[in-house]
Image: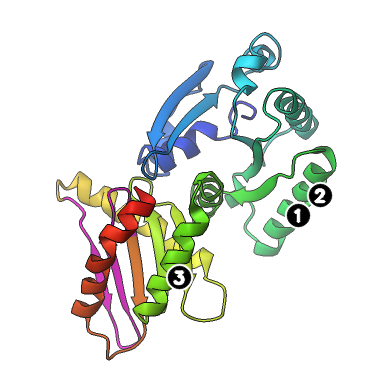
Amino acid sequence: MGRSGAGKTSMRSLIFANYSASDTRRLGATIDVEHSTVQFMGDLGLNIWDCGGQHKYLDNYLNEQKESIFGNVEVLIFVFDLETTNKDREYTLYDECLLNLAQYSRDAKVYCLVHKMDKILDSDQKAAMVETYKKALNKRSDMFQPGVYGTSIWDHTLYQAWSQIVYALVPNMATIKRHLSNFCRLTDAAEVVLFERATFLVVCCTSGDEDEPQLEKYMTISQGIKHYRNTCTEQTSPFRSVHIRTRAYSLFVEPFTKSTYILVITADPEIEPAVTKANIDAARSHFAKLAD
């Protein structure tokens, strides 16, 4: 949900339809509501409603169609356009959406994406802008506690935000993460990441160290692998796996279960690549029961 031109369809096409950032320039304005269903992590199907942001459609969503639009919602994603010349109107639209959401889907989660952050070059200014939105949105969100992220189709931030969104949707995520941590420990891996197969969004990650996993790094890897996979497809050469070995580490990206890929990084030079691949193969059937 969001005003016309905010970038809603571009981000959906980038994440779920394998568009490149430059390809999204060809997309036209969304007419009314575009429905799409995406199979995600086994039996989890995402029904995505991309609502056109022109005034005549917004008025219809918030009045005549409000029960249809806001009923049975699991997640509302509101896209704020950093380039808007009418920020007050955006906030008013957000308020009206939350009023309807509170009436028809009180348990829904809310995420706010401050989009087109590439227009701000300074990292400190970016952080300050997102913080400004966070404070304003928290004050007006009442019963909802929105997750607020700065995003751009030109870097990893969009993948980071959407990974957080899908993380909240997978029902047995805590179990998957616990088993992934056990796999990391038993195989002496430095880092392990589970990606959703079609989108390459990060499902969950774990680290052998006490430090928190470096999410930003994984999002950059996710974006890079998806770009590489799309390039392979364009060259009619199907993407299968990635293996990189240096003096400091070995990195493996392998198909794992029917709906996931796995990234395993080892930092011990004594661990042979064949051993790591054998460990991945051995764990595949176990994780298929959890993820598929």
* Residue that sits furthest to the left in the current view: 236
- Residue at the spot 63% in from the left edge and 50% down from the top edge: 150
The N terminus lies in which quarter of the figure? top right
Nearer the viewer's eye, disc 2 or disc 3?
3
- Residue at the spot 22% in from the left edge and 66% down from the top edge: 281
Under mark 3, the amino acid is: Ser
Of residues 202 and 232, the one drawn nearer to the viewer in this rendering: 202
Circles 1, 2 touching at the beta carbon (< 8 Å): yes
Which label number is shown at residue 131? 1
Q: Position of residue 63 (x, y in %)?
A: 71, 12
Q: Position of residue 208 (x, y in %)?
A: 46, 79
* Residue that sits furthest to the right in the current view: 139
Within 10 Å of disc 3 (Cα), the crowding (few <14, some 14-19, many 20+) is many
Q: Position of residue 93 (x, y in %)?
A: 74, 26
Q: Which residues are magenta?
A: 238-261
Within 10 Å of disc 2 (Cα), the crowding (few <14, some 14-19, many 20+) is few
Q: Which residue is mark 2?
A: 135
Q: Is residue 213 visible?
A: yes
Q: Position of residue 35 (x, y in %)?
A: 46, 23
Under mark 2, the amino acid is: Lys
Circles 2, 3 touching at the beta carbon (< 8 Å): no
- Residue at the spot 21% in from the left edge and 45% down from the top edge: 234
Element at badge 2? helix
Element at badge 3? helix
| Disc on the earlier residue, 3 or 1 | 1
Q: CA distance from mark 2 to mark 3?
A: 34 Å
- Residue at the spot 83% in from the left edge and 38% down from the top edge: 140
250 drawn magenta = yes
Which label number is shown at residue 181? 3
